[in-house]
Image: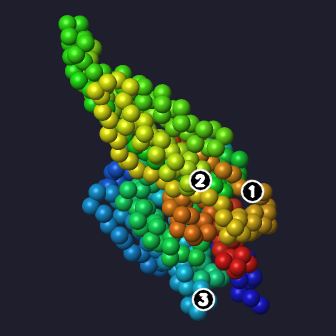
């Protein structure tokens, strides 16, 4: 009998027997602070995962960075596989929370929900990926080599990890990203892209009482630009422009010589990026307040994750195997961004939101549905074992 058809029960049973261990690893990860810009903290959290892989005889390789945390690669080979491209399980270990947050709000379980910083976004997904790797290492049945990539800076648009993600994504057969499942129980079938920008307006200072006419208000020009930028929002086409931070001025009795703002652009289709940036550039070049000038720069960005025919094959199989595990799942589009957009842009079939179900990410009320830690791990394992059915 085909190995792929006999392996899933053994893999699923291996995971079933380790539900308690999965929760223990999750607790350890959640109680380890890992803010994106805290290299020491995010690398200490990485050490927890490296110890897990070592305990299960899964080799690990590291790509270090002088500013941000390490990228961790783990691999489970498959001798004699027809397709030697890895099946990539991806996730990030950084969180948006400041140092000390884990001490203030340690991991806890109340009823069927677990709480703590990063519990859903996305330390539960890392636990799922790690245990699925270990399950196949222990009992086999994977239709090709498995790889895990654990990054450290997704919450700040992956400044160090993006080239690694794109390189590994190009080399992979499929990418399965462990971001949290939606609160509805669905997985993510599509994501918006985003561009984060900063702009600066230069004016001319003058005393606002005795010399007002000589001033050129940078704040006044900033206000005109904000109105123009927000007017670019086109909800019908999924384009939003938001100026979320502003600063400027010298004193209340001085015509403002300088001002700055930060822009969040979101879009659905890759072609919309160039269109929106062209419009933003035109707004920056045009001055309403005479003798003011503006400069702007891109601080970081995510690419959209768009559904493709091959990704749809993955989605269809995931829906099928989830139904066999006893839960119903569908695809859901989200305006949030993730590293899955980078791999999808490489042309690699990508699914996202395969982690445990959770909600209220980035807040003190973030939660994870405890039973889904196991059921989502089992669904991911079944998807991998039956990947050949997709023809991918």
Find the distance from the CA under tag 3 to the CA under tag 1: 30 Å
Q: Position of residue 59 (x, y in %)?
A: 44, 78
- Determine the residue positioned at 50% across, 76% down: 171
Residues tagged 1 and 2 counted as in contact (Cβ below 8 A):
no
Left or right: residue 70 compared with residue 254: right
| Dot 3 alpha-carbon crowd within 10 angstroms: few under 14, some 14 to 19, many 20 or more | few
- Determine the residue positioned at 63% across, 55% down: 190
| Dot 2 alpha-carbon crowd within 10 angstroms: few under 14, some 14 to 19, many 20 or more | some
The label number, if any, that marks residue 81 in the structure image: 3
The image quarter containing residue 48 is: bottom left
Work out whether residue 253 can be spotted. Answer: no
Relative depth, front residue between 374 and 324: 324
Tell me the residue that label 2 is attached to.
Answer: 269
- Determine the residue positioned at 57% across, 70% down: 348
Relative depth, front residue between 91 and 237: 237
The label number, if any, that marks residue 329 in the structure image: 1
Relative depth, front residue between 377 and 211: 211
Q: Position of residue 206 (x, y in %)?
A: 21, 16
């Amino acid at each position: 009998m085909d190995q792929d058809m006999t392996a899933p029960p053994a893999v699923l049973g291996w995971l079933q027997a380790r539900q308690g261990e999965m929760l223990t690893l999750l607790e350890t990860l959640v109680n380890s602070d890992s803010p994106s810009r805290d290299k020491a903290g995010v690398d200490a959290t990485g050490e927890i995962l490296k110890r897990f892989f070592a305990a299960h005889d899964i080799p690990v390789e590291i790509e270090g960075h002088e500013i941000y945390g390490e990228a961790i690669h783990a691999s489970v080979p498959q001798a004699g596989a027809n397709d030697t491209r890895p099946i990539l399980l991806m996730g990030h270990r950084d969180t948006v929370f400041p140092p000390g947050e884990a001490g203030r709000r340690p991991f806890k379980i109340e009823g069927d929900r677990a709480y703590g910083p990063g519990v859903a976004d996305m330390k539960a997904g890392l636990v799922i990926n790690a245990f699925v790797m270990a399950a196949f290492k222990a009992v086999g049945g994977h239709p090709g080599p498995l790889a895990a990539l654990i990054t450290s800076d997704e919450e700040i648009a992956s400044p160090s990890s993006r080239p690694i993600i794109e390189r590994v994504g190009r080399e992979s057969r499929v990418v399965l990203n462990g971001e949290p499942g939606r609160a509805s129980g669905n997985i993510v079938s599509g994501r918006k892209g985003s561009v984060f920008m900063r702009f600066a307006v230069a004016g001319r200072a003058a005393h606002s009482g005795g010399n007002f006419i000589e001033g050129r208000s940078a704040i006044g020009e900033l206000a005109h630009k904000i109105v123009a930028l927000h007017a670019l929002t086109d909800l019908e086409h999924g384009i939003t422009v938001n100026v979320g931070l502003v600063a400027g001025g010298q004193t209340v009795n001085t015509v403002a010589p300088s001002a700055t703002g930060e822009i969040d652009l979101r879009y659905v289709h890759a072609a919309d990026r160039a269109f929106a940036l062209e419009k933003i550039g035109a707004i920056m070049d045009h001055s309403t307040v005479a003798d003011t000038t503006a400069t702007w720069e891109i601080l970081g960005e995510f690419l959209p994750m768009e559904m493709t025919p091959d990704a749809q094959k993955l989605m269809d199989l995931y829906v099928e195997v989830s139904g066999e595990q006893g839960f119903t799942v569908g695809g859901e589009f989200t305006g949030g961004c993730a590293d899955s957009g980078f791999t999808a842009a490489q042309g690699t079939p990508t699914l996202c939101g395969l982690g445990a179900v959770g909600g209220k990410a980035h807040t003190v009320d973030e939660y994870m549905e405890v039973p889904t830690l196991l059921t989502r791990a089992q669904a991911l394992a079944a998807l991998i074992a039956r990947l050949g059915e997709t023809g991918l």
